Image (tube, helix red, strand yellow):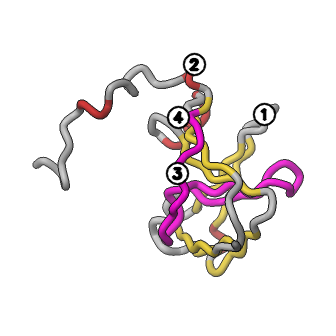
Amino acid sequence: MTSKHSGSCLCGAVKFEVQGSFDSFYLCHCSRCQKDTGSAHGANLFSATAQLTWLQGQAFVKTFQLPSTRHCKSFCAECGSALPNVQMDGTLLVVPAGSLDSPLVNRPDAHLFMSSKAEWDERLDSVKQYEALPF
């Protein structure tokens, strides 16, 4: 079954659509994903068959390729939000899960690069939880 997902950046300058299914969903804890997300891990969906269509703002999409690595990140030049990109000579679509506006039924398949996991990323289920800012 083919699926369709829509997404956008934080400021709304960029909008896109993904037509097709995702093959995998990984939470990557490598130091590079920590740096480019500012968080404990990257959360990316991967597909070898889905098609990406830019609906608006493609001129705002910038891509950074870390020299001498396969690490690549696309983002909105206006607000910095992570955006999809095509990697590995056009054979792999990578979509940051948080960039999607449509519901996502996929659950992560695995955590990657756990040996690089942030030291503070432990026992998070025991940390207080709030529905909004606590102040």
The correct choice, above or below, for 94 with respect to 112 in the image is below
Please state if 8 lies on the left or on the right of 130 as rendered: right
Disc 4 and disc 1 in contact, CB within 8 angstroms: no
Given the image, on which type of amino acid does mark 4 rest? Gln
Mark 2–mark 1 distance (CA, rounded to whole Å): 19 Å
The correct choice, above or below, for 89 with respect to 21 in the image is above
Q: Which residues are magenta?
A: 82-111
Q: Nearer the viewer, mark 2 or mark 1?
A: 2
Given the image, on which type of amino acid does mark 1 rest? Thr
Mark 2 Cα within 10 Å, few/some/many (few <14, many 20+)? Answer: few
Q: Which residue is mark 3?
A: 107
In front of the other: 76 or 130? 130
In front of the other: 91 or 38? 91
Sequence-first disc among 1 and 3: 1
Placement of the N terminus among the 4 image quadrants: bottom right
Q: Nearer the viewer, mark 3 or mark 4?
A: 3
Q: Which residue is mark 2?
A: 115
Mark 3–mark 2 distance (CA, rounded to whole Å): 22 Å
Q: Nearer the viewer, mark 1 or mark 3?
A: 3
Given the image, on which type of amino acid does mark 2 rest? Ser
Sequence-first disc among 4 and 1: 4
